[in-house]
Amino acid sequence: MDNPMDTKLSTFTTHQRPKLNTVQEPQEKFARYKLRKERKDLIGLAQTRSGKTGAFSLPILQALLEAPQAFFACVLSPTRELAIHIAEQFEALGSSIGVKSAVMEKFINLYSCWRGGSGKQSIALGKRPHIVVATPGCLVDYLSNTKGFSLRTIKYLVLDETDRLLNEDFEKSLDEILNAIPRERRTYLFSATMTKKVAS
């Protein structure tokens, strides 16, 4: 007998697939597998452009559909460009349920990312997004300097390109972020390579 949760996600995935051609069949199966395994923490190995964003976003969107709330998930990326790509894919896949995402990025000018005032990031946060995507350093800036901004309610933490995030450049920022989010959460680590740091 089919798992009803699996069927539910299969239907959701099928509806989203025409909107995002990078969500390939192996990633859809992986997403359904994760849902059947009670959404526990996991490590996923996937090459760039293999559809890995769909693999971690679909289970998160399914969980959000079942229990909607703002600041539901946080995705960390080593680069601004990847962060923007991730947010775009979340919104494409979640368009039918009104998903809102916010990319926390540094401004091109001399202002740091939290001094934007009425900038697009501040506006996006004011709309209470479901998904926050950021590089570690910029997210720490926001958490430290933006009044009222907190990630104490998030249910999912994703580290995309974990092998790059777990180097010394991001170590201090990651420690601060982990201290600012709930211990009771689900953590997804996605990496192109299985390094010793990723495995541990």
Image (cartoon, rainbow, N blue to C red):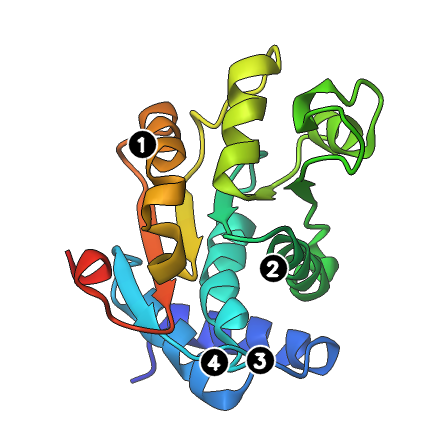
Which of the marked residues, 1 or 4, is nearer the chain's N terminus?
A: 4
Image quadrant in which the N terminus is located = bottom left
Q: Marks 4/3: CA distance?
A: 7 Å
Vertical side of 10 occupied by 134: above or below: above
In the rendered image, residue 122, in percent from the top left (x then y), is placed at 75, 26
Identity of the residue drawn at 36% across and 37% down: 174
| Pointers 4 and 3 in contact (C-beta within 8 Å) | yes
Position in image of residue 110 (x %, y %): 76, 26
Give the residue at mark 3. 23
Amino acid residing under circle 2 = Leu
Q: Say which label, 4 or 3, has the lower sequence index.
A: 3
Question: Which badge, 2 or 3, comes first in the chain's sequence?
Answer: 3
Dot 2 or dot 4, earlier in sequence: 4
Instruction: Please provide percent x and percent y for residue 180.
Output: 38, 24
In the image, which is nearer the foreground, mark 2 or mark 3?
2
**Label 3 Cα neighbours within 10 Å, binned few <14 / some 14-19 / many ≥20:** many
Q: Amino acid type of disc 3?
A: Val
Mark nearer the N terminus (1 vs 3): 3
5 on left or right of 121: left
Name the residue type under label 1: Asp
Q: Check disc 4 and report its element: helix, strand or loop.
A: helix
Dots 1, 3 in contact, CB < 8 A: no
Find disc 2 in the rendering and name its residue. 82
Q: Which residue is mark 4?
A: 28
Vertical order, 189 against 127 (above or below): below
Q: Which mark is residue 175?
A: 1
